[in-house]
Every structure is written in C-alpha cells, then in structure tokens.
Image: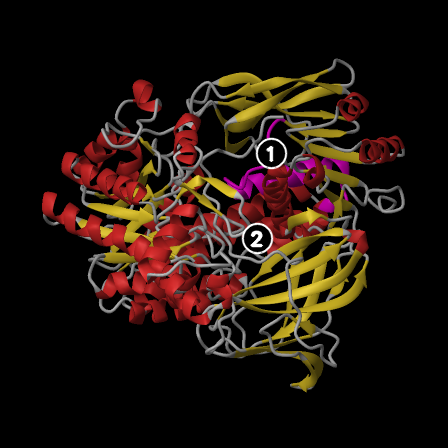
Amino acid sequence: MANPIRPNVLIMAILFVFPENIVYAASSSSGWTPLAGTSPAVSVSAEGRAAVKFLCRFKDNPIDRAAWDHPQKLDLGLAAGVEFDFLCKNQSPIAYFTAYFRSGGGWYRVGFEPDDSPGWQTVRVLKTRAEVEGAPAGWSKIDAVRISAWRGLDEDAEFFMTQPRPFGASASIAVIRADSVAKTNAAELSSVRQYAETVSTMLDDLGLSFVVLSDEDLDPQRLRSVRVAILPYNPGMTDSAVAVLSTWIDSGGKVFACYTLHKSLADKMGFLLGGFVSQKSPGNFASIRAVDESVPGLPPETRQASWNIFQPVAISGKSRVVAYWYDSSAANTQKPALVASDKGFFLSHVLLPDDSANKRRLLLAVLGSMDPSLWKQAVNLSISRIGKLGPYASFEQAVAGITRLKFGRACDEALMLARTRHELALGELAAAHYPQAMSAAVDSRAALLRAYCIAQPSMPGEFRAFWCHSATGVEGLDWDTVIGKLSENGFTAVIPNMLWGGVAFYKSDILPVSPQIATSGDLLAQCLAACKKSGVQCHVWKVNFNMGWPTDRAFKARMQAAGRTQVGFDGKPEPDWLCPSHPDNRKLEIDSLVELARNYAVDGLHFDYIRYPDADHCFCPSCRKRFEQSIGQALTGWPNIVRTDATLARQWTRFRQDQITAVVSAVAAQARAVRPGIKISAAVFRNGPTDSIAVGQDWKLWCEKRYLDFVCPMDYTTKTTGFRDTVAKQIRWASGVPVYPGIGLSTWPDSTDLPRLIDQIAATRDLNTRGFTIFNLGPAETAEVLPMLGLGITRKLP
C-alpha cells in the first residue's frame, strides 16, 4: 500500500523513555507511584478541590522527567479521550506533559499542553493524537495511567490534577483509527495518527460530537448508536473489523472512507477501487471540484495539494462521481476525487488540513448528506464562533474592537461585509436553511478575519523569515513565484532546505548530488536568482548528520559499512544518522557548508539537526574509542558506566557537546573567511540548558562565543503565554545574539490559524526580538497565510 505521507515531511523528535524500562521509587498514599528520581504524589485539597499534588524536583536533580503511574481500569473504547481538572501556577520549568495509557503488551502515548491559565482548567487528552508503543490490546483494556512532566528548566515546579475520566462516550459519529497496524506494519502508525487527528480537529471545529474507536475495539455493541463511521486512513484492516463494519452497513450504517478501503467494503458500498495514481508533476492534484449539486453544501472548489490517489470507479446504478480532481492550471484531470452511493462516500486521498474553511464545509456536506441532523448542530456553533478571534469573545466585541482601531476603508468594507453575512446566517438558520446558513457564516468569519488582519500594525526593520523544507519550494510554484510572494507580503528572508547529511540539491563536489537536478536544474541557483530579483535574503538550511529520506540508499549503506553511522544505547544501529564523533563525518559536515559558501552568493548558512537524535545516541565503537582517548582511560561496563558513574556522566555530556560544537565553530570560521559578511545561524531546541545535556546542542555556548549571528529556537507551541515566557529566557541565554523565535505554524492543529500566529508575532515584538521565523512554507501557508499577514502585521512599509 502506498503511504500517503510525503517523504519530506519534518517530524519533530521527542525525547522519551519507553514505559517498560522503568524503576520505581517508593509508593505514596495518593495511589500514584513515582518513578525513580521523582518525588511522591500527595492527596491534597487545592483551592477547594480534592486533587493530587505532583512535585517536579528538577533543580540539582539529573532527571529528564518527573513521572508517576496509577493503576486504573478504563474502558475508553467508546470515548473521545480522557479529561481531568488541572492546576499549575507556573508551568515554565516544565517543557511539556505526556499521558500514557497501558493496554495489554503496549502503551498509548499522548502529549498535551495545558492552557496558560493560573487557575483550575479542564484538560482533554484526545485518543486521535495518541502514538503507539509496543502492541497495545485496545482502548477498552486500559489498566494503568502514567503522567510525565518533562524537564524544561533547572527549577522545581508543582501541579495538581484530579483522576482521569472518560469523555465523549456517546455520539452518532465514530472515527475509526487503525491501531491494528502496530502489529502488521508499524511504519504506518504515524500516518494513521496524523490523519485521524486531522479529521478529529475538523469535527471539533465544526462542533460535532464524535467518538474515536480503535479498530481493535470494534464490535456491534460499540457501533450500536453510531450512524456514520469515518475511516481517515485505515490500511490493512483486520478481517474481524471488516466483518463488524460490513454487518453494521447492512443494518443502515454509513461510511466516509479516505484513500484506502477493504475490497469487500467497497463492493458493499457500490463502487470499485482502481489502481494507485501518482501525480505526473507537482500541482497535478490541486483542488476538488464538485460536478453537480446532489450533495447540499458541498463547496464548488476545495483546494487540496495531494500527491497521489487511489482512483475509485463509480458503478452505474449504484454510485456516482460528485467531484473531480483539477490541477493547478484549473484543468480537469478526469480522476474522481469523491464518489457517493446510498451507503456512503469515498475520497480518493486522505483529508489534508489546507484550505481549512472549505475542507470543513466539504466534511460537513458529506456527513450531513448521510445524517441531516448534523447540520443544525454545526451551523449553530459556526455562527457562535464567528467573532472569537484574537482578544475577542463574541461577534459584537470583535466588530467594536476592530472598529476602534480605525485602519481605513478596506477594513471598514470588510467589517460591513462581515455584518451583512452574519445577519444572513442568522436568518437562514431561523428558516432551517442550514447549508445556506453555513455558507453565510463562513463568509462572515472570513470577512471579519480579513478586517482583523488589516488592522494589525506593521513594524519596520524586522527580520521576517519562513523555513521551507522542500528544495523545490512550494509545490506547484517555481522559486521565482514563491520568493515574489514572500517579498510582496513583507517577508525579508527565506531559509530553504538545500542539503542533508548525504545529499545536495545543487552542484557539489563534496556531497552526492540529488538526481532531481538532472531534470529540475540547480535548485539553489534558482532560489538565489529569485531572492536577488526580489531583494529577499537566502539563508541556506542544512539538515546536519541526518541523511534522511532524500539520501541514496547506497550512500547510506557505505556509511554504515565504514562504521560512520550511529548506534543506540541498546546496541541497535541507527543507519540514517552519521556519528558526530567520527572525524570523517565532521569533515563532511564542515566541507559541505564551506563549499556552499564559497560557490554560491548566499546570505547565510543555517544549521538544523545540529545535535544527536536523543540521549540514547550515539554509543558506537567510534564514540567509545574517542571518549576513552579524551579522558585517558579504558572503560569497563560500557555503555552503562557513563550513566551510573557521576563523574563519567559529566565527562560524557561534555564529550558529546564538543563533537557538535567543533562543527559549528569550524563552519563559522571558515565560511566567514571565504565569504565575508555571511551570517551563521541555527534552528535549535527551545530549552537550551537541558537540551545541551540531552542532545549535545550547547547553543548557549555558541552564542557566547559568537559562532552564531542569530539563533532560531523552535518554540513550537500553541500557547502564547508559554511562548512568550520561553522566548524571554532564550534572549537571556543568547547573550546579546539576536533571537528570531521559531513559530510552529505548520505543527499546529490548524496550520492556517492566523489569530494565534498574529498573537505570537506580537509577543516577539513585546520582547523586542526584532524578528521571527515561521515553520513551514507549504501550499496552505502560501495561499492562505502569507497574503493575510501582508495585509497588516507584515505589511510592506514605504
């Protein structure tokens, strides 16, 4: 089965310890058992509420996290997730939280970030966001819960919470998550989680109640109250799950399936699945366009930058095509995007989050066609949310607040349109014309958001950059167009990913050259020419040490055979990562970047992945040999000894840091020599003091030594208060080197969340950083975010 995940999607690394490899400290009366190094939890009364107090002793305590286990039998089979009441007066010492749920021979793991509120709040942990460790037996068989608070600062913290409880246990919509792939094809797990989460986020945004069912938990009883089942991406469904769904469809249940579907279910639903079809060129599958009005409320056009499909075939008398794929030139590809029958719908790719407003309308139209009662629920919520943006809690507040900003005629016109469409939405709702009411509500929200964006002030002299993870730029656009759009909307720099640990997307005598340049040309030269034309800086991004997806397998094999790739603490090879302690690898990193600076008139060089993957790497023979040489003694008990002996542990930490720092310092010196004025920068983990220990990334030292001209911490959080607090600390750690905080737009549930993005840009201005960097420039960000920022907060000034 072809994987719908793009090969160049950036996956953020999260340091964690597998739950089965644990040592417990003494138990406590609260029922929560602390892991080794963690203080006991205590039952207390906090601000009038019975709760458990968790103390995180991070100061002078070398632990990555504080964690507690609680035996608790939970049947979450029919739930959307768990919720609990939470209180924390100061979250800044805690980087993030993780909830674990033990089931059978494995665990489900879900990260969560509470709001910044200092008072009690309800935290919800969604099953759709869960990652899988081992082989859990299903959400209906949970027998223990773990809460982990990960170290952010060398400061103590405390928080309070009540016992976890299920929520969302009854709904007419079920999202079926393919957890069974953990046993058959674990490589698909991240795709399964990603697309289930995308659909769940859309359902939340629509205000539709739903449950999340693992395909491990499917049985007739759990589907009894469900009228519509969504299969977001369900490769390799088990025979038992197929049988349950088949019987349920016979009893009147309806299905919305995306990209994959078992043949017997496709037969039952009345259509055929043809073959896999890959795009002929970028932009081949650019939008979904309706061909008739048989599905009320289906948008005429919904943008979606897909790269492959499974082509469905409608069967006369049983099913019909309701939408086709169009390419970026607005030509009909004649490939069905959406087919329908009286049993449900099939979308020929997964649902992606781009064009979010129309994507939600498409989803609602499909669901509403199968269960018309869903329309009223969604429309009511949509109208109530029109004015909830930025600091405003209602439509009236938003209109009044934006009006007071007095930002000219364009803003006034947008506000007038927002008012008229808001009134129309209310009228259509009263008349029970739900598709028309939803359309008017969407238009009102769009107009109000436009007015809000126009009203934001710009600031002169800022460094404004987008990371772009693709060497070709934005899919469907050439570099000239992409850079032109950045410039038009007030951005001053681009950071394009042009080289990895084992490949270059330009002419190089140091790294293997991607075969793509034989057909596409020198991609770096094209980007630089576009930047020069538009007056945009180009800081070339290298993924250091990580060879990743674009590197030729033969090159990786040669590196591994030569003993140049990493080995984990457990002795398992990590063939994608070059070992920083190997001198040939450091030379490769240095020479490739200096060559680039010598041969291309770039404005800067930008390090990324300039670190180890995690604390469990690298323990290869080269590391052992060179570490022993550095301390002047042979070691017994390798590798455990560097964790159990305190002196050796400190020396090992410094050794790892030195390997990375050697590359940064050498590149800074040599690149500045061959191209005076070049800027050296790095994308770094956000918690400098602790991450320097965990992954060897001592960026605080790099700033002190002035190896870097600016630093971009990856502050990928949706919480603006936490973002601001973290950036304030980073400014101190940077010792006067400019900090251009990394805003994780593309990592958020909604990668077009303009109000939140504006809030975080405003936070950088409050802290006087004089710049920011946004991840990542893709199709949705280019089409939906850039032009709106250019209306106001990044507006070009005379």
Q: State the image coordinates of residue 211 (x, y, percent, origin top left).
A: 75, 50
Q: Position of residue 201 (x, y in %)?
A: 61, 49
Is residue 604 found left or right of 201 in the rendered image? left
- Depicted 39 relative to depicted 764: above or below: below
Q: Is residue 656 above or below residue 428?
A: below
Looking at the picture, which amino acid does disc 2 mark? Glu
The vertical placement of 333 against 361, above or below, is above
| Residue sitting at x 24%, y 57% | 710
Task: Place residue 220 in its image quadrant.
Answer: top right
**Residue 320 lies in what quarter of the image?**
top right
User: Is 554 covered by the magenta stretch?
Assistant: no
Q: Residues within 10 Å of mark 1 (few under 14, many from 20)?
A: many
What secondary structure is marked by label 2? helix
Residue tagged 1? 350
Residue at the spot of label 2: 423
Say which element carries label 1. Answer: loop
Q: Which residues are magenta?
A: 348-374
Residue 384 seen in the current view: no
Mark 1 vs mark 2, CA separation in Å: 35 Å
Of the numbered discs 1 and 2, the one sitting upstream in the chain is 1
Q: Is residue 370 magenta?
A: yes
Are the residues tagged 1 and 2 within 8 Å (C-beta)? no
Q: Closest to the observer: 364 or 694?
A: 694
